[in-house]
């Protein structure tokens, strides 16, 4: 069952690999952004054609629990990027000494938006996170840890 969940999750992520041609002028969001307060969460924007592939996750490796979000942004406005069908995964090592993490798919229908604030911060509003303040990111000035 665990392997079936992982296979379905990977198939859903693979389905995000193609971008539609949207041809809209916008700010460049490419690169790594780190959460402003602790700089532990990284949002990586990779431009592919006229859309962005986005991965959000913890910067550190080897954590007992690791959360990841994946989304494709095809609706690119002048200063706002919106997404639907975002994927949220939770990977965790259930027992001490485990070499393989258990992966649980929390949802595959996520939606939200990224936009730049007046002071240059990247703001993430996730529609699936109830009563949560937006996450604020700054441009990364370091290489992510492996």
Image (cartoon, rainbow, N blue to C red):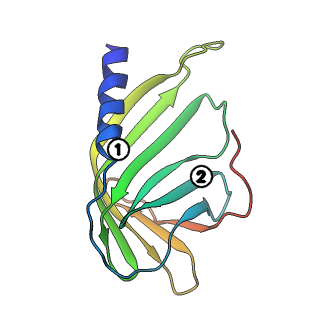
Asked whether disc 1 touches disc 2, contact meaning CB atoms under 8 Å apart, the reply is: no
Image point 66% across, 12% down: which residue? 97
Quadrant into which the C terminus falls: top right
| Residue 102 vertical placement versus 105 (above, below) | above
Residue 75 is at least partly visible in this image: yes
**In-image side of 9 versus 136 (left or right):** left
Sequence-wise, the earlier of marks 1 and 2 is 2
Mark sitting on residue 87: 1
Gap in angstroms between the C-alphas marked 1 and 2: 16 Å
Categorize mark 1 by other alpha carbons within 10 Å: few (<14), some (14-19), many (20+). many
Q: Residue furthest right?
A: 142
Q: Nearer the viewer, residue 11 or 70?
A: 11
| Residue 40 vertical placement versus 92 (above, below) | below
Q: Nearer the viewer, residue 146 or 35?
A: 146
**In-image side of 134 versus 131 (left or right):** right
Q: Quadrant of residue 111?
A: bottom left
| Residue 32 vertical placement versus 62 (above, below) | below
Label 2 sits on residue: 41
Secondary element at tag 2: strand
């Amino acid at each position: 069952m665990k392997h079936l969940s992982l296979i379905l999750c990977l198939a859903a992520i693979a389905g995000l690999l193609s971008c539609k041609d949207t041809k809209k002028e916008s700010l460049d969001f490419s690169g790594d952004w780190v959460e402003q307060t602790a700089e532990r969460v990284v949002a990586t924007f990779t431009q592919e054609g006229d859309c962005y592939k986005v991965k959000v996750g913890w910067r550190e490796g080897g954590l007992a629990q690791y959360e990841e979000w994946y989304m494709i942004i095809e609706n690119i406005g002048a200063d706002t990027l919106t997404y639907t069908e975002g994927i949220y995964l939770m990977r965790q090592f259930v027992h001490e000494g485990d070499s393989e993490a258990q992966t649980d798919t929390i949802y595959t229908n996520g939606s939200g938006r990224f936009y730049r604030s007046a002071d240059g911060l990247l703001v993430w509003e996730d529609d699936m996170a109830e009563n949560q303040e937006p996450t604020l990111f700054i441009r990364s000035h370091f290489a992510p840890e492996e």
